[in-house]
Image (spheres, rainbow, N blue to C red):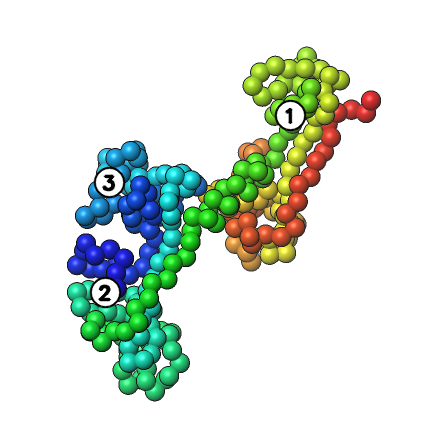
Amino acid sequence: MTTDPSDRHQPVKGEFAVYGGAVYPARAAAGLWPCVELLPGPGVPAPEDVAPRLAADGSVLGYPLPPERLDAWYAVHWTFHWRGEPFECTDRVDTTVSGNYLGDDREFARQHLKRRVTGYRGAFPLAEVTEPEEHREDLLAPRLDLARRLSEADHFRPGCHAVLGGTTHRAAPAVDPHGLVALAGGGAVPPEQLDAWYRTHWTFQWRGGPFEAVGTVEGRIKGVYTGGSWGFADANQLDEETAPDGTHTRYTVEADPDSVTDLAPHRTDLLPPR
């Protein structure tokens, strides 16, 4: 029962990624979403074609990779039986296996196990453990799907666009001093030459409160609370931050996309009537 036989202390749960045919301990790369960070350990050489991420002291934090370059990324844990009763494995050292009790036989638990704050646990000789089973949860497919969804929605960022000759450009939200609409990438045109000019933004509900999306952070939607209840902001522990004007305060949340409801785009036309 092991996920990596190279160490005396056997890891029995965690995250792992497969890259170039090799299996590495892994984790989501903080600050580099949607990348996954490979964490080579004893007996596992570092990938030669991946640049390391370094700490301030020069030590290697990990080897970040975009998820599309991975063969697999998954979370793993083990279960086993001891004397016919089920356990989730929490540790293995040499020939001793520890686990949290998953059964409901209280008499068995009182006789053979140690009480936890909730439930029971025990440590057993490996030779007495039966039916070891590895359980994997795929992390790669959901990450790739979420990255695609956020990219298609431009990460729910508010913005302005202009359509010129059938091509859509990012654009300024107002005309410049010369009465022209500046286009991203260079160039500016009079509004009357545009096929369309509009602002887009997204709104959503979270825990019953209204929000306007301002982008994403580490795969989570960031939204500004647009309701008027300080009690809601306090009860839901919204983050307090200074608004872009530098004067006012606003309350924000970073929510998992699957935890929000009524997520909807809105479009405001900026071209004057013709």
* Front in this rendered view, residue 220 or 18: 18
Query: Is disc 1 in contact with disc 2, using a CB cutoff of under 8 Å?
Result: no
Label 2: how many Cα within 10 Å (few below 14, some 14–19, many 20+): many
At label 2, the amino acid type is Arg
**Could you tell me residue 113's position as x and y percent?**
28, 79
**Could you tell me residue 82's position as x and y percent?**
28, 77
Who's the residue at 25% across and 45% down the image?
A: 40
Whichever of labels 2 and 3 marks the residue nearer the N terminus, that label is 3
* Front in this rendered view, residue 202 or 193: 193
Whole-Å distance between the Cαs marked 2 and 3?
25 Å
What secondary structure is found at the residue carrying circle 3? loop
Q: Which residue is mark 3?
A: 46
Q: Which residue is mark 1?
A: 168
**Quarter of the image where the N terminus is located:** bottom left
* Front in this rendered view, residue 175 or 256: 256
**Quarter of the image where the C terminus is located:** top right
Whichever of labels 1 and 3 marks the residue nearer the N terminus, that label is 3
Q: Residue 198 vs residue 123: left or right?
A: right
Q: Which residue is mark 2?
A: 92
Whichever of labels 1 and 2 marks the residue nearer the N terminus, that label is 2
Whole-Å distance between the Cαs marked 1 and 3?
44 Å
| Residue 54 appears in the rendering | no
What secondary structure is found at the residue carrying circle 2? strand
Q: Residue 192 vs residue 77: left or right?
A: right
**Could you tell me residue 103's position as x and y percent?**
38, 78
Q: Residue furthest right?
A: 274
What secondary structure is found at the residue carrying circle 1? strand
Please give the label number shown on residue 253. Answer: none
**Could you tell me residue 187's position as x and y percent?**
61, 14
| Residue 149 appears in the rendering | yes
Who's the residue at 66% across and 41% down the image?
A: 265
